[in-house]
Image (cartoon, grey):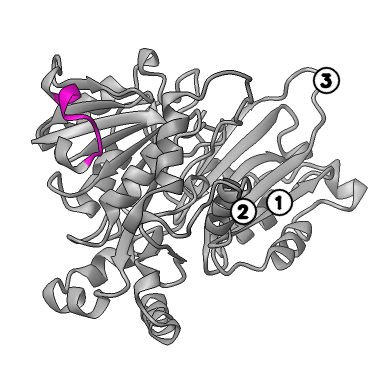
Amino acid sequence: MNSTASTDSTANDPDNDENAADAADMDHPIGALAAGGPARPAGPQIPVVVLAGFLGSGKTTLLNHLLRHSGGTRIGAIVNDFGSIEIDAMAIAGQVDSTVSLGNGCLCCAVDASELDVFLEKLTRPSARLDVIVIEASGLAEPQELVRMILASENPHIVYGGLVEVVDAAEFDATRDRHPEIDRHLALADLVVLNKADRVAEAELGRVRKTLGGLCDGTAVIPASHGRVDPELFFDRKPRTETIGQLSFEDLYADSDDDTGGEDDAHDCHAHDCQGRHTHAAHLHAAYESASFTAEEPMNPRRLMAFLDNRPDGLYRIKGYVHFGAADPRNRYAVHAVGRFLRFYPAPWARGAQRLTQLVLIGSGIDAEALRCELATCRETDPQDAATADEHGMWGVLRYAQG
């Protein structure tokens, strides 16, 4: 029995994307599809993240962590069966129309692989108010096929959000022996979560990471314990609004996960440690790096595309807005890249808006200062060049544009 869960846990940015960036290998599901697809709807598109990994890797634990730490953003999770999601059995018993509504905003729906498109359509209706959808690959289809389905989907409300492969650090070699196809899965991944990192010695962890580096060809590898990964790696979280009053059910649920719970806890929390949750969040954030870049000068489209076509190893996500100046004075370009995937969304500048380029880059092992320096070289610093449109300069950008 397959199912779908949805909870509050990520904000969409208008910079969400929808097709592939340069994948030289046309066998890759992203490289096989041209930038095109359905017309973009008026509202923001919902990123669809594929979560894959072999039995025991901890992908379900990771998914439960995301659902528990929704923090005001709404996640829709399509899973193999209700048993993999930590929900009240009474809720399942009372389901209507194969759908369970959870106390913290989740929706769980029983689905079959052949019904995936139907349920994606259902979850992307405005009434569902979802910000992101996560598909746990187990029991539905091969990760590569799920990626192809998402990229080829005619649903205008969704956008590819990346293929995340979860790996068991302690059983990595044994998993490769049992499932040689893991090498192929890793080669396709946009992000690798090296789970159960706490169960191996530092030297062994380094060896596994080195092996993964050879298999993943520059893909970001994030170490994790007990499936705990910062949700901002996958999607943008809504800002939390502080209110005075009773703790919500979700607050209590998250507290029990952070402060009490046995095997899944990465650290002990005590009543006198009021910084416990902040320490936990900082610990998760330490697994990756982010860099921000702002420029008042317009960006040169050719130079920016050269940067995007040759992204450094470990860079997983890029989001933000680009000002191309005379190359397209009417439009601001939302940009979102996930792994090999790249998409631009041009839209008219708001009246009176300050014309800036603002980008955020997220990854593992990245050099933030070096990235900022590279992006700085993409600016049009000569006033004469900035005022002159390059007739063909935008072609590379428009190849990945949807609007």
> To which residue does mark 3 refer?
352
User: What range is drawn magenta here?
Assistant: 85-92
Relative image position of residue 379 (x, y in whole percent):
79, 53
Q: How many marks?
A: 3
Three-letter amino acid code at the position of disc 2:
Leu
Residue 65 visible to the viewer: yes
Counting from the top left corner in percent of width and height, residue 196 is at: 34, 67
When asked about the image quadrant of residue 144, the answer is bottom left
Residue 23, position as x, y percentages in the image = 40, 60
**Which residue is at the far left?**
1
In the current view of this chain or complex, which residue is farthest to the front?
272
The residue that appears at 24% across and 33% down in the rendered structure is: 87
For label 3, the SS is loop
Q: Amino acid at mark 1?
A: Ser
Separation (CA) of disc 1 from disc 3? 24 Å
Q: Residue at x 27, y 41 (%)?
A: 135
Counting residues from the N terminus, which is met first, the one under dot 1 or under dot 3? 1
Q: Residue at x 69, y 63 (%)?
A: 368
* Amino acid of disc 3: Gly
Residue 361 marker: 2
Per the image, the residue denoted by label 1 is 292
